[in-house]
C-alpha cells in the first residue's frame, strides 16, 4: 500500500462535509418531516450572539440551540467596533428588524486575539483590530498590572474585553432607543471556559453601565422622554 498523499486526505476531509450535510438533513427530517419547510418561512430569533471566530467556540452547539434560534456574528476576539460596518449592521438589523430580546457578547479564555494584543509586536493589518483590545488594556491598566500571574491577567483581560464590548453595544443609538423605550434588548456578557466547556455569565450590571455612560454617549433620547 502506498501512503495517501496529503492532497487526497484533504480532499476526503472536504468531501466528507457534504456527506455530513446529507446525514444532517436526514436526521432533521426524521424528527420533523417539515423541518426545512418551516425554516424556509423566515427567522424570528430572540438572541443576537456576538462571539469570537475561534473554531473551538461554536455558538449554537454550546448553547444547545437550533437553526432559527440565534442571530450570530463572529469576529476575532468578539470586538464591537463603531467603525466596523459589519458589526454595526448586524446590531442594527437584529434590534430594529428582528427585535431580538437579548444581545450576548461572548468571549473565551485562551483567546488568541486577546493573547496577540498582549504581545508587544507589529502584526500588520491586524494592528487596528487588536488596537480595540489594547485600548481595553489601557482603560484597565491598573487592575491588570496588579495581577502578577500571567495566565490570571490574560483571563481577566478576556473578561474585561467582554465588558467593554458590551458597553460598546450600549453606545449604539439603535440599542439605546429600543432599550429605553421598550426594555429590550437586554445586553449580557459571557465567557466560554474552553477547559470545562462551561458558559459563564459575568452578570454585568449593564443597566447601571448604560446610566453611567449616557452622560457622554446619549444617542437614544426616548420618544417618551
Ligand atoms: Co478568540
Image: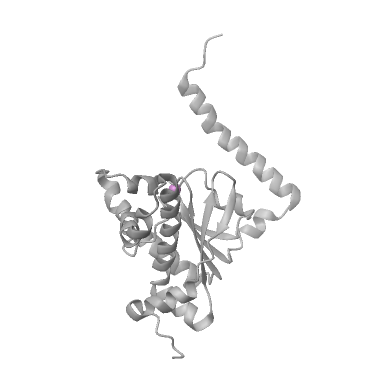
> Does residue 212 appear left or right of residue 48 in this picture?
left
Q: Residue furthest bottom?
A: 225
Question: Residue drawn 55% across and 52% down?
Answer: 59
The one nearer the camera, 136 or 21, is 136
Q: Quadrant of residue 220?
A: bottom left
| Quadrant of the rendered image containing residue 68 | bottom right
Q: Residue at x 32, y 62 (%)?
A: 139
Residue 90 place in picture, x, y as percent:
44, 63
Q: Left or right of 5: which side holds 32?
A: right
* Type of colouring: one colour
In the image, is residue 214 above or below residue 201? below
Residue 128's place in the image compared with 95, above or below, is: above
Front position in the image: 126 or 157:
157
Residues 112 and 54: in front is 112
Q: Position of residue 212 (x, y in %)?
A: 40, 77
The residue under the point 61% across, 41% down is 21
Q: Say left or right for 115 vs 200.
A: left
- The quarter of the image holding the C terminus is bottom left
Amino acid at each position: 500500500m502506498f501512503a495517501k498523499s496529503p492532497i487526497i486526505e484533504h480532499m476526503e476531509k472536504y468531501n466528507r462535509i457534504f456527506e455530513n450535510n446529507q446525514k444532517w438533513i436526514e436526521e432533521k427530517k426524521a424528527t420533523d418531516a417539515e423541518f426545512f419547510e418551516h425554516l424556509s418561512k423566515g427567522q424570528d430569533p430572540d438572541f443576537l450572539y456576538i462571539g469570537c471566530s475561534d473554531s473551538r467556540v461554536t455558538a449554537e452547539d454550546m448553547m444547545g440551540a437550533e437553526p432559527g434560534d440565534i442571530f450570530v456574528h463572529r469576529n476575532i476576539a468578539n470586538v464591537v467596533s463603531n467603525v466596523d460596518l459589519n458589526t454595526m449592521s448586524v446590531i442594527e438589523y437584529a434590534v430594529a428588524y428582528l427585535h431580538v430580546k437579548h444581545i450576548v457578547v461572548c468571549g473565551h479564555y485562551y483567546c488568541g486575539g486577546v493573547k496577540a494584543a498582549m504581545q508587544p509586536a507589529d502584526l500588520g493589518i491586524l494592528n487596528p483590530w487588536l488596537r480595540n483590545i489594547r485600548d481595553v488594556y489601557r482603560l484597565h491598566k491598573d487592575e491588570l498590572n496588579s495581577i502578577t500571574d500571567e495566565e490570571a491577567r490574560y483571563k481577566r483581560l478576556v473578561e474585561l474585553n467582554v465588558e467593554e464590548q458590551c458597553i460598546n453595544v450600549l453606545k449604539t443609538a439603535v440599542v439605546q432607543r429600543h432599550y429605553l423605550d421598550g426594555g429590550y434588548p437586554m445586553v449580557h456578557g459571557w465567557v466560554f471556559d474552553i477547559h470545562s466547556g462551561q458558559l459563564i455569565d459575568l452578570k454585568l450590571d449593564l443597566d447601571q453601565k448604560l446610566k453611567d455612560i449616557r452622560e457622554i454617549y446619549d444617542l437614544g433620547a426616548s420618544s417618551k422622554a
